[in-house]
Amino acid sequence: MQEQLYRELYELESKHWWFVAKKKIVLSIIRKYVNYDENNKILDAGCGSGLMLNDLKEFGQIYGMDCSEEAIKFSKLIFDGEVKQGYMPGNIPYNKNYFNVIVALDVIEHIENDEGALMDLREHLTDNGICVITVPAYMSLWSNHDVVHQHKRRYTLSELKGKFLRAGFKVEKISYYNSILFLPIFIIRQIHRLLKIEKGSDAEMPNRLSNLMLESIFSFEKYILRFFNMYFGVSIIAVVKKFE
């Protein structure tokens, strides 16, 4: 992907309701577990276009990693911290037991050996560090969007929790999210499947009013998720720690 395409992706993600609301939710969850400390080291594993890098400065020193050389080049244009090329499992280009916080947002569903990737993340956390992970939920929601974005799978809560435990994590919080919009999204995807409509990515920009309404609805979940878990949703968010 050329630099211009990453720029277009960054501009889309900066405005699109799904990315904007997800960022608000993730930051709200991190605030519950992490206070700012200038000595905190935070890794965005799979930083892509770099959407989260500057916002994570709220918690400490930020580092980025992505497998794409072009993603790294673009991230360095919008972010003044360190960004390195790497992949999981087996090639996180930082020392083990180094990070107080690692975020992997919609990353591990792209990796064939997802449990190996989780073990890799665990090895790079400090003893009291946390990892914040998001993934897409339910294979029943599988669509051409997953194919376009090269997903290997979608997860259930129990399946993902089992992978965390086998990777050596203790689960602090795990919940479905994007729950309020679950029913319309589920119905639309089932209709597309029934009628064999091969729509592309769901990340196309809607009109301004629709975008604002969807962002407001989805963003509201940040208030719920700080205190409660949800029992269904389009995605899953988890906070995990090393076993002590």
Image (cartoon, rainbow, N blue to C red):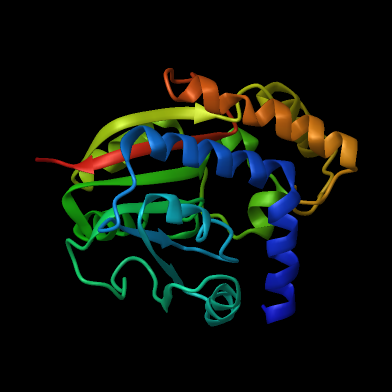
State the image quarter where residue 94 is shown: bottom left
Q: Nearer the viewer, residue 203 or 37?
A: 37
Q: Nearer the viewer, residue 141 or 71?
A: 71
State the image quarter where residue 22 is shown: top right
| Badge count | 0
Q: Is residue 133 above or below residue 158?
A: below
Q: Is residue 96 above or below residue 72?
A: above
Looking at the image, can residue 137 be seen?
A: no
Seen in the image, is 223 located left or right of residue 201?
left
Q: Which residue is painted at 84% across and 44% down in the image?
A: 197
Q: Is residue 122 above or below residue 195?
A: below
Q: Which residue is painted at 28% across and 71% down in the image?
A: 90
Seen in the image, is 86 located left or right of residue 224?
left
The x, y position of residue 100, in whole percent, is: 25, 53
Residue that lies at the very extreme toward the left in this rendered image = 244
The x, y position of residue 84, in whole percent, is: 41, 77
Looking at the image, can residue 83 be seen?
A: yes
Seen in the image, is 219 located left or right of residue 121?
right
The x, y position of residue 185, in whole percent, is: 72, 30
Seen in the image, is 238 located left or right of residue 218?
left
Q: Nearer the viewer, residue 31 or 190?
A: 31
Quadrant containing the N terminus in the rendered view = bottom right
Quadrant containing the C terminus in the rendered view = top left
The x, y position of residue 215, in whole percent, is: 72, 35
